[in-house]
Image (cartoon, rainbow, N blue to C red):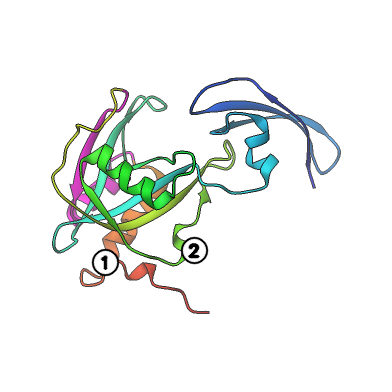
Amino acid sequence: MGRIISINQTTKNRFLNMYDLEVEDKNGGRHSYHVASRARKKDELKLSTKKNKPDGVIIYALYGELQDRVVLIRQYRYSIGTYIYEFPAGLIDEGEDFHIAGIRELREETGLTFHPIEVDSIYSKPYFTTIGMTDESCAAVYGRADGNVSSKGQEDTEEIEVILADRKEVLRILQEENVSLMCAYMMMHFLHADPQKPFAFLESPKA
């Protein structure tokens, strides 16, 4: 098994930092590896704590009395220099429960009020996003949303359009647009869900 020999923090930013690792592979070879992390210092890295504490929350919200539309955002991202479709999401504040973070983030990004539902922990616990480059992990919340769309809570650095997409629009987006991977998978669930039981895929699993 490979091992980490040393960690060197190369940036000191608020939301994202870079760490250079000196590593040894399974055959004893030495290499450099670069990791991006939400951790502000190296002893907070997940490779140091060995704990998967969620950095962010992703929000799967259905809208309308019939719950026949899913809340998406179309956001400009500098990493690709254009717009991409995503689920509303955001970072969890220190000491904040991720369910509360989901309510707050949906309000800030979309103006909508989020009503979470309880789900088995396998659907909501934090999972890693892009493990080849970062130790970031995100939890997920599910529920319904109501109210009126508003951009008043968005930050100046955010360029977000709120989309209340029905199944026809979801299919078009998947066929034609840039979509984040997690969003795409969940849109596929939405696309094939029973309209009478839109959250059926979240039922507790049976062994």
Relative to 160, is 101 on the left or the right? right
Q: Earlier in the sequence, mark 2 or mark 1?
A: 2
Instruction: Tell me if residue 16 can be seen.
Output: yes
How packed is label 1: few (under 14 Cα within 10 Å), some, or many (20 or more)? some
Residue closer to the observer: 124 or 2? 124
Q: Does the residue at mark 2 contact the one at mark 1 (Cβ under 8 Å)?
A: no
Name which residue type carries label 1.
Answer: Pro
> In the displayed structure, would residue 5 be above or below residue 60?
above
Please give the name of the residue rendered at 26% of the width and 45% of the height, measured from the top-left corner: 72
Is 12 in front, or is 192? Answer: 12
Q: Helix, strand, or loop for circle 1?
A: loop
| Residue at screen point 83% across, 34% down | 29
Residue 152 place in picture, x, y as percent: 19, 31
Identity of the residue furthest to the top in this view: 11
**Which residue is disc 2 drawn over?**
122
Q: Which residues are magenta?
A: 157-178
For residue 198, the mark is: 1
Mark-to-mark CA distance, 2 and 1 = 18 Å
The answer to which image quadrant residue 118 occupies is bottom left
